[in-house]
Amino acid sequence: MKNTDDRFDLPQGTLDLLIMRVVALGPIHGYAIAQRIQQISRDALQVQQGSLYPALHRLEYKKLLSSRWKPSDTGREAKFYELTSRGRTHLKAETENWTRLTDVVGLILKGTLEGI
Amino acid sequence: MGWLRRLFSRGRLEADLDEELRFHYENQVADKVRSGIAESEARRLTRIEFGGIEQVKEDCRERRGTMGLESLLQDLRFALRMFARSPGFSAIAILTMALGIGATTAIFSLVDATLLHPLPFPHPEELVRIEDDLPGAGATDAGISIPEFKDLQRSGIFQYVVLQIFGSANLTGASQPSRMQYEGVSPGYFAMLGVKPQLGHTFNPQDQTPGISPDVVISDGLWKRAFGSDPHVVGRSLRADNDLYRVIGVMPPGFRDPGRTVDQRNTEQWAALGFSDDPASTPNRSVRLPLETVGRLKPGLTLAAAQSRLDALAASLRKQFPDDYPADSKWSVRLVPLKENLVGNVRQSLILLFAAVAVLLLIGCVNVANLLLARASARSREMAVRQALGAARQRLVRQLLTESLLLSLPGGVAGLVILFCMKGFLVRLIPESLPRLNDLSINWTVMLFALAASIAAGIIFGLAPARQAGRVDLAHTLRMEGRGSKGSTLQTRTRRVLVVTEFALSLVLMVAAGLLLRSFWDLYKVPLGFNPQHVMSVQLWLPSPNDPKTDIYGTAAQEAVFARELLRRSRLLPGVQEAALGAEPSIPLQHDGNPSPLIMEGRQTQSKQPPLVERSEVTPQYFHLLEIPVLRGRLFNDGDNENAPLVAVINQAMAETYWRGENPLGKRLKVGRGREGIGLHASKSWITIVGVVADARTESLANASVPQLYLSLYQDTPKELAIFLRGDLNASAIPKEVRAMVQSVNPELPVYGAKTLNDAVSASLEQRRFSMDIVAAFAITALLLAVLGIYGVISYIVSERTRDIGIRLALGAQRGEIMAMVLCQGLGLAAAGAALGLVGSVIVSHLMAGLLFGVMPSDPLTFVGVTLVLTGVALAACYIPARRAIRVDPMIALRYE
């Protein structure tokens, strides 16, 4: 566990979005997903196995991700996840949603209280 | 069907999941090693970071979507394994549930057949009985006039309106003359009920033939009895009361007439009556005929809507015919659901039985819950280990509930099997007076009920142990190091609560049984006012043919000759010391009650509806034979015959009702027969009262003072006769001897219904006895279960406190004190249960007040007695573990620790 101060709780559903974004870059296994999220967020987000794998399985169950086994860099067989076409559409929609939501929330939070 | 595939490829999925997580773990370790941490340390750190690997897996499985079914299968497998390991426990639990659910389902099937689906006809809710009331004259269901019947038919409220008249007739022509119940109905009767015959056809509803049609429909029973199941019976003839009828149809075996009395429901022959000509024809609004009116409402019309339209109709008729409907009689027409014919009298008894059996089932559940709790304490370590390995609490609760359902469902199935095997026996237990048109059947409703009861029972008794499992203190339990952990205080408390509940429920049942028992006993012991010992009655029936010219007993003189001859020959029968004759209503406790209108000389009845009184005709010996004493005046004598002035004897109740403070002797009256209009069959001349006899409970055991009027049989022509014999009688030979004797006078007369009056007395108690027996059986079972429960808890407490008791003994406590301490524990539970139970009992006993006779619902004797018995038995049950407690050897108890 790292410095817990830089870490924060992800809002509900955000983890799914992050995972799909990372998987969209190409077939990738669970460990690498966790690593990638940690790198990109500059260690601010650290995904626990306890949340990562249930989320992966849930997305696979919803047919947003597909998986297959193939050798990894180390030569060992690993389970690689890919976005399905349905997942791609879903990711696009969710990303737009997210952007809109953060814009609106940001607008309100930054806004002055003059209007009131 | 992805989930199905996933379910069956579970092995591969598991291996994949394992491999996926292992891959992650190895990579993480490798990363750590790369950053310079020693491998063993890297593995340790990673494992800590990973947390509960099983928990992660469980989460993943849950996300896969097959979790519910998968875990159910797993739970089932596990539960079966648990049961196999403790077969004794499982057997007891399943057996308890089998008995509980079996008994509940048995009573439910009775409720289903009687209360819920009493009428086995299409759209039974449309069928209604139509009653005419004259509230101004104090008369309900006063009969209907033919013009009123026609008004109803034209009203547009009903699809069918049908008149019924019930009676019985002599069936002759078969090997032995017999009596059968017949019914005259309007031709639309069967069409209205919506039943089809098994052979031939029924009446044409459009038939407008006046008078009595010679076509009859017969029951399956009569077809078998009189026609030997002849498949070509249609067109054959039969003779009833000397009249010739032609069979046009045979009803199916299950068909019973939805009449009000047992006799009516046993109708064997239906004849079509036109009700438009003789013998039932008077087109006069004020002549009310003794008919039942039944109708089928137009589809979609509710009872309330129909009633309001009927009220409007009655109002307009009252206005239109003010002479026929005097304002003070307040004539009105009332609709009653036809099913009330069957369920009206027994609803309360059946609800009581059902409630009693439900309480019994509840007690059974509490007992099994107690057993499960005892076992749960043995399994608390198992539960703790599973939780420590990452099983969620809800998951454990679900597993325990699966286990308890696995106990209750086979219990339910076994209960159904027992019920199915015992059905024949059960049906025989049910008194005939408990009305059923439906046969008791294990139908879908009953099966669904059994299923629902099983599931409810499983949840009820599984809840306590499951709740416990959710609250295990992991660290504490695991630290107990497999020593089979002593139960927690929480568990002991739960078990106490359960026992107190059980005790309270048993007390309620026992109070109910006690009150019923006391009612029954009081009724059984009530002074009858007549002496049934050594008396038998045998019935015969004189034909009353439709053609008066063929009636050989048409006048009082003709019948009196026959009656005297019958009496003379009766006295010659072996063992007979006294003999008397009476009309059928004079047979004690058999009569259904059919009071006759009464006119008293010099008293103006306020309306056309006269007061009603029970009447019967008897020969002079009747009162002496039944030992009914005369209070004033004289009894009949042989001089009160067809040539003498008409005389009557009344009972005390009648004197009190109509001549309070006056001398009834010498007063004169006229009386009709049954609920017929006074104009139809009332005596032509005045009848003088010559004597008053004491009240006897010949009408009803529960009611001492029913006004009764007796006429001299020699002066009247009753058709339903009874021969009363007193003496040293051979009850099995009498029917044959009397039949031979009667048929030596007239070979065409059927003789039936021979019985001792003692049997008649017990038969009139049979419905009460039935409910009492069943509730008592339930109460005894409940007592046993409660005692077992309290024994179990006290034993458990003693074994838990063995060490504590050992220390006390070692420190010098007296064994008597230890005994008192244990007994006090038991007494405390019993007292708490009794207090709760008494409150419940007071409520229940007031609800069942209508079923009681002679005892107050809060009868102190019953309440105190039952409480004492229950407490005493509970103390006895505690005595065994208490003795074990005082035998504790301090050395052994302490060393054990």
Image (cartoon, coloured by chain):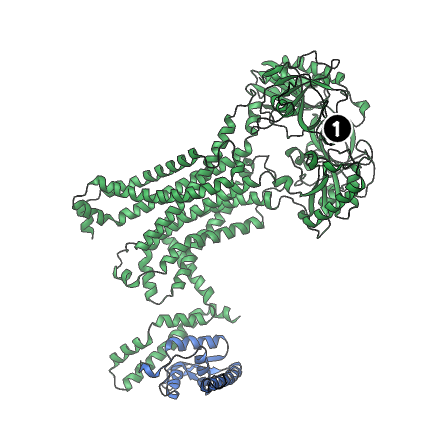
Chain colours: A blue, B green
- Which residue is at the front of the view, B415 or B619? B619
- Residue B15 vertical placement versus B101 (above, below): below
Q: Residue at x 68, y 12 (%)?
A: B638
- Residue B343 vertical placement versus B710 (above, below): below
The quarter of the picture where residue A5 lies is: bottom left
In the rendered picture of this protein, how many numbered marks are placed on residues?
1
Q: Amino acid at mark 1?
A: Ile
Residue A2's spot in the image, x, y percent? 31, 82
- Residue B687 vertical placement versus B789 (above, below): above
Q: Is residue B453 left or right of residue B367?
A: right
Q: Is residue B296 left or right of residue B760?
A: right
Residue B189's spot in the image, x, y percent? 74, 41
- Residue B700 vertical placement versus B414 (above, below): above
Residue B114's spot in the image, x, y percent? 59, 42
Task: Classify mark 1: helix, strand or loop.
Answer: helix
- Which residue is at the front of the view, B839 or B295? B839
For the question of whether residue B791 can be seen, the reply is yes
User: Callout 1: 10 Å neighbours few (<14), some, many (20+)?
Assistant: many
Q: Is residue B764 left or right of residue B718?
A: left
Query: Which residue is tagged 1?
Result: B678
Residue B635's spot in the image, x, y percent? 64, 14
Q: Is residue B575 left or right of residue B228?
A: left
The quarter of the picture where residue B483 lies is: bottom left
Q: Tell which subunit mark 1 falls on.
A: B
For the question of whether residue B752 can be seen, the reply is no
